[in-house]
Amino acid sequence: MFNIQTFNAIAKEGLQTFDLEKYVIDANEPADGILLRSYDLHTYAFPESVKAIARAGAGVNNIPVDACAERGIVVFNTPGANANAVKELVLASLFMAARPIIEGNAWVQNLEVDENIAAEVEAGKKAFAGTELAGKRLGIIGLGAIGALVANDALALGMEVVGYDPYVSVDTAWRISKEVERALTIEEILATCDYITVHVPLRDNTREMFNEETLRILKSNTVLLNFSRGELVDEAALREALDEGILRLYVTDFASPNLMKQPQIRVLPHLGASTEEAETNCAKMAAKELQYYLETGSIKNSVNYPNVDMPYNGHPRIGICHQNIPNMVGQITTVLAGYTLNIMDMTNRSKGDFAYTLIDIDQENQVKLDEIKQELQAVQGVLRVRVIEPLGVMIG
């Protein structure tokens, strides 16, 4: 039996994907897998039993990803599962940036209610005139699952759309309309667009990508939307750009003391993925990733180990998390050769400093599998070894 530990309220549809003949949820015993949303694991003392963590969402800033990789713990996220929810919020924010809908509603709600209300509203509505999105130029930085959806729908609204993403995948490229222009540099987006929305992960090279230097490239009265991470923006430089009229409005999903109670800054309470559908989709996807790894050793959508998906043929299988250093595969196969094992199938992939090797062996005598595991674990550079037997029975 596998024990899955949850650290947040997980949608029941996700938990229901676990086969109760193979899994227990939150049992009072060491966990094999962790399923969570926003719970902070940076100070969590991981038991040796934990083999994988699945985040029901895209961001993994609440997980010590590198430290987990060093212990052979595979970390998964759920790219694309909440993309539609975020896309819809981006589109809603575009409409509210173009038309002062919120401000107009607040004004009407504060009026005296009497027989003159209709006339008063008619006389005062000119203060809330806006602009149309059709014909305006939208720049999208990051054309992943969310950015691609925004691009296509913005085209349908009549906007001119230009996108920048030097790492766009082939699958995403097929999904994006051919009418979306391609920008070769971020500067092209900054200098030419009326609206800019950013959809990139927070990394060392994206932290404060909107800073004093880049914000000065913007055309005047630009609207910037940030539904990715607050740290992408240098807040001091942002406020200066707003004061100088370079930026007309900043819309973000991430609260910060420096952004509050500013008329040109609209802060939402981290609503991007806060829909019933998105939470359900993320929970189901995260649960399936955990199950697939625990039962077959195959990896899909990991952020710290490479994707390795090898069809499971029912023979004993060995999954090895190890450092990405020379001669690892040679040392692993040498150990197996010492037991006269026939390798039926093998895949090795790397991702940065870490790698993963998955091996199917043709061996009817299972007695020495635990001994093999221990010898492989002793190889320098090996971080974790799992032996998966037929029907999902696992050693380690």
Image (cartoon, rainbow, N blue to C red):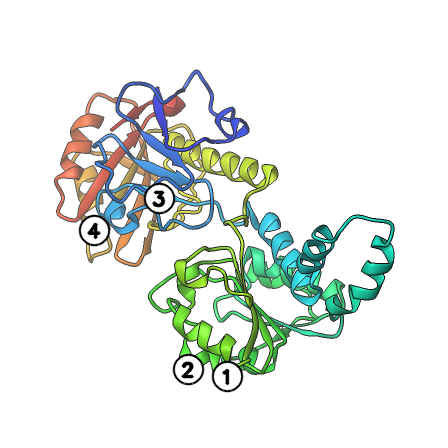
What kind of residue is marked 2?
Glu
The part of the image, by quadrant, that contains residue 38 is: top left
Quadrant in which the N terminus appears: top left
Tell me the number on the disc at residue 75.
3
What kind of residue is marked 4?
Met
* C-alpha gap between disc 3 and disc 1: 38 Å
Element on which disc 3 rests: strand
Res. 139 in view = yes
Element on which disc 4 rests: helix
Tell me the number on the disc at residue 328.
4
Q: Do the residues bearing badges 2 and 3 touch, measured as CB atoms within 8 Å? A: no
Choose the circle earlier in sequence order: 3 or 1.
Answer: 3
* C-alpha gap between disc 3 and disc 4: 22 Å
Choose the circle earlier in sequence order: 2 or 3.
Answer: 3
Residue at the image point whose x is 21% and y is 21% from the top: 367
Rendering coords of residue 133 (x, y %) = 73, 69
Element on which disc 2 rests: helix
* C-alpha gap between disc 2 and disc 3: 35 Å
Q: Do the residues bearing badges 3 and 4 touch, measured as CB atoms within 8 Å? A: no
Residue 357 vertical position relative to residue 253 in the rendered view, above or below: above
* C-alpha gap between disc 2 and disc 1: 7 Å
Question: Which residue is under mark 1?
Answer: 217
Residue at the image point whose x is 30% and y is 45% from the top: 357
What kind of residue is marked 1?
Ile
The part of the image, by quadrant, that contains residue 274 is: top right
